[in-house]
Amino acid sequence: MLKCTRNFIFRTCSLPSHVTQRSICFFQRTGKSGNDINLRWKEVEHRHSSPRGLFMCRVQQQDATSEENQENISQATLIWRAIKLPIYSVALIPLTVGSAAAYLQTGLFSTRRYFMLLASSVFIITWLNLSNDVYDFDTGADKDKKESVVNIVGSRTGTFIAAYLLLALGFLGLAYTSVEAANLRAILLLASAISCGYIYQCPPFRLSYQGLGEPLCFAAFGPFATTAFYLLQSSTSELPITYTILSASVLVGFTTSLILFCSHFHQVEGDKAVGKFSPLVRLGTQAGSGVVKVGVATLYSGMLLLGFTRTLPFTCIILCALTIPVGKLVVSYVEKNREDKTKIFMAKYYCVRLHALFGVGLAAGLVAAKMVARYPVPKPIF
């Protein structure tokens, strides 16, 4: 017998005692557009102990509601998602932390050079976002992604041209600043960072499809970019590489990679369909949420270790420790919503919040160490 209610379909039948029954439940609901929304076939196992046991299966309406919500997203919301404004913190934080480390070393800060580098970095990040949409469009990974820039503007060629014009502008700005600072090491590091972005997503490499996006992201935004920005804040002589800047760059790279990792949660099925073996495709969402938990714990444990060994000023440890509630929020949100495609979409933005606040705490701690704590000048490695 089938019994329908607003939220569920119930199927009831009689069974012999002590029999394990496998049944198939199917839910169908008519959406606002008049089209049927089919959730899924779901196998349910039931065991009964009564002579005339009854079983009841039900399927929640959550996925149907999710699909309806996806259909009803406004154009303004799609454009906001396509712009990805919060993601541009990955341009701001490496530059700010690198500049703060240079200030700790020299007591100097060039505002003009900072904003020149910031504008160039924003152009580079925009190239990354646009070209990623272009190449995911080519492979079909973004076929159903309404916030894809290619899908919004309706032009793959226009998006491609805009992406590479921005790359050229961004690289010219970085090169000009490096020449002005007479720092060859900095431009080599920045070129390496951009190369990581290229082989991450662009043909013929597309290493993101092999699950290598996170290590590339770590190297690009951490040791490469953050260290380069540190070197470019020198106005007189070339700055030495110290354990302080290297450890700060590792922390920046770590939090940036966490953003990328969490961005895969809502795309597992789509990535799997086009052969993109992201870490979440390989691990699954349950193991992935465990990785997030271990990752956040490692971030703060590493920070404490660097503080106790005096590799980083203690002011950094105090200010970064204030972000621990945000780290806990990331972990709990992912654990709670890892199977909900609609809600888990926001996980990467919680990671952006952690990345930004942690980076600000790290940079502020480096500046405070110079201005207030009179932290000794870090000794050079080379």
Image (cartoon, rainbow, N blue to C red):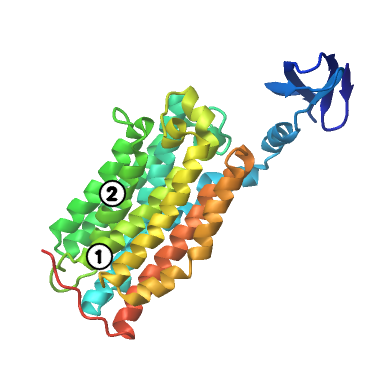
Across and down, in percent, residue 268 comes to: 51, 32
Instruction: Looking at the picture, tell me which residue is in the foreground, 342 or 10.
Output: 10
- Residue 365 appears in the rendering: yes
* Disc 1: which residue: 245
Task: Name the spot of residue 21 as percent of width and height, x first.
Answer: 73, 16
Nearest to the observer: residue 39 or residue 114: 39
Residue located 61% across and 46% down the image: 336
Of 50 and 249, the residue lying toward us: 50
Please give the residue where the numbered disc 2 appears in the rendered image. 219
Task: Tell me the distance, in whole angstroms, between the alpha carbons under discs 1 and 2.
Answer: 14 Å
Q: Amino acid at mark 2?
A: Ala
Asked which secondary structure carries label 2, the reply is helix
Check disc 1 and give the amino acid type.
Answer: Ile
Query: From the viewer's perspective, is 151 left or right of 241?
Result: right
**Residue most extreme to the top:** 16
Q: Which mark is residue 231?
A: none
Position of the C terminus, as image quadrant, is bottom left
Q: Residue at x 38, y 30 (%)?
A: 209
Q: Is residue 255 left or right of residue 75?
A: left
**In the rendering, at what x and y percent does residue 61 appear?**
76, 33
User: Left or right: where does residue 314 sit relative to residue 341?
Assistant: left
Q: Position of residue 29 (x, y in %)?
A: 79, 25
Of label 1 and label 2, which has the lower sequence position?
2
- Helix, strand or loop under label 1: helix
Residue at 48%, 55% (x, y): give it.
352
The part of the image, by quadrant, that contains residue 305 is bottom left
